[in-house]
Image (spheres, rainbow, N blue to C red):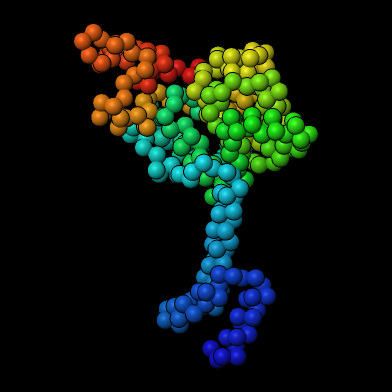
């Protein structure tokens, strides 16, 4: 390839805004000559480099806009620590087919069992397939609602949260909702019903949602829309965050009754306490 032709080709690539090809052009040309690629094979490799770069940029941008608290994948999830989970089911959900059908996923379980990790991982898997995702904790959403009320932009917030194909709402039940926030959440779920998917994590059983929103009728209406087309996954296990502390003897069950003569906790209370980290969680 003579210098004039090379410079002309680089100029064309720049005009076409093919940003990654110029970086790889020399390498691809050498490989084509060495391996005797046909013109079609060479063109295929060139375009594949550019498409891959654009997908990478798109994933990076969508991941940044998603507002994840961290980025983790399913391959980083320790399924052996939560044997009650059906790994095949979770990996099927990672295909994001549920988003195409406007279905929801509800992840229930006590704190620390991996609900947020799974929600983020499913969100990341969706982004890799070109799906727009936004993540909020319910507590952060409540703060935004209160600020939006003061600044008269609640409707704009509602409209914005209906845009992404997948909305992740984390930690439902950790903080009680005031009436306005509960009504906003109901409107959001109603607007997205059968149009946009929701992944929601909660440490509360469905029967306790009335206490969270201080309105059992509103809670029932929310659940009616969320559960109509949905998959509920109950995670029954102990906390990832506390397992090492427990092994080291640093952490003891807060619901356990102390035994006379020492600080150790009652084994029966550890195993049966309804709020204990080791206790079983019945999400329904």
* Residue at position x 59%, y 20% in the image: 176
Q: In which quarter of the image is residue 180?
A: top right
**Residue 158: percent from left, percent from top:** 72, 34
Q: Is residue 234 above or below residue 211?
A: below
**Residue 53: percent from left, percent from top:** 55, 63
* Residue at position x 39%, y 43% in the image: 76
- The count of marks equals 0
**Residue 36: percent from left, percent from top:** 45, 80
Q: Which residue lies furthest to the left in this view?
A: 261
Q: Quadrant of residue 96?
A: top right
Q: In this view, does 168 lie above or below 126?
A: above
Which of 13/274 is in front? 274
Q: Residue furthest top?
A: 260
Whether residue 158 appears in this view of the structure is no
Whether residue 127 appears in this view of the structure is yes
Q: In this view, does 29 lie to the left or right of 17?
A: left
* Residue at position x 49%, y 80% in the image: 26
**Residue 50: percent from left, percent from top:** 57, 67
Q: Which residue lies furthest to the right in this view?
A: 152
* Residue at position x 28%, y 27% in the image: 250
Q: Is residue 29 left or right of residue 278?
A: right
Which of 44/111 is in front? 111
Q: In this view, does 109 lie above or below 52?
A: above
Which of 176/19 is in front? 176
Q: In which quarter of the image is residue 55?
A: bottom right
């Amino acid at each position: 390839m003579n210098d004039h032709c090379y410079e002309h080709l680089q100029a064309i690539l720049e005009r076409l805004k093919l940003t990654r090809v110029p970086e790889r052009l020399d390498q691809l040309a050498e490989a084509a000559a060495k391996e005797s690629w046909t013109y079609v094979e060479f063109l295929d490799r060139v375009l594949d480099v550019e498409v891959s770069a654009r997908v990478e940029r798109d994933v990076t941008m969508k991941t940044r806009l998603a507002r994840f608290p961290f980025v983790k994948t399913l391959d980083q999830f320790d399924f052996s620590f939560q044997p009650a989970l059906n790994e095949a089911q979770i990996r099927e959900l990672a295909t994001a087919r549920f988003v195409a059908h406007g279905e929801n996923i509800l992840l229930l379980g006590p704190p620390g069992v991996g609900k947020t990790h799974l929600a983020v991982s499913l969100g990341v898997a969706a982004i890799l397939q070109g799906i727009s995702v936004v993540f909020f904790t319910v507590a952060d959403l409540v703060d935004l609602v209160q600020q939006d009320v003061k600044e008269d932009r609640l409707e704009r917030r509602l409209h914005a949260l209906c845009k992404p194909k997948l909305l992740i709402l984390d930690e439902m039940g950790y903080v009680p909702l005031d009436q306005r926030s509960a009504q906003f959440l109901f409107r959001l779920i109603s607007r997205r019903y059968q149009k946009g998917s929701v992944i929601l994590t909660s440490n509360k059983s469905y029967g306790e949602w009335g206490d969270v929103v201080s309105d059992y009728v509103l809670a029932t209406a929310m659940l009616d829309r969320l559960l109509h087309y949905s998959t509920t996954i109950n995670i029954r296990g102990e906390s990832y965050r506390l397992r090492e502390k427990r092994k080291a003897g640093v952490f003891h069950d807060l619901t356990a009754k102390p035994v006379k003569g020492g600080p150790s906790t009652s084994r029966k209370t550890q195993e049966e306490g309804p709020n204990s980290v080791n206790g079983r969680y019945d999400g329904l």
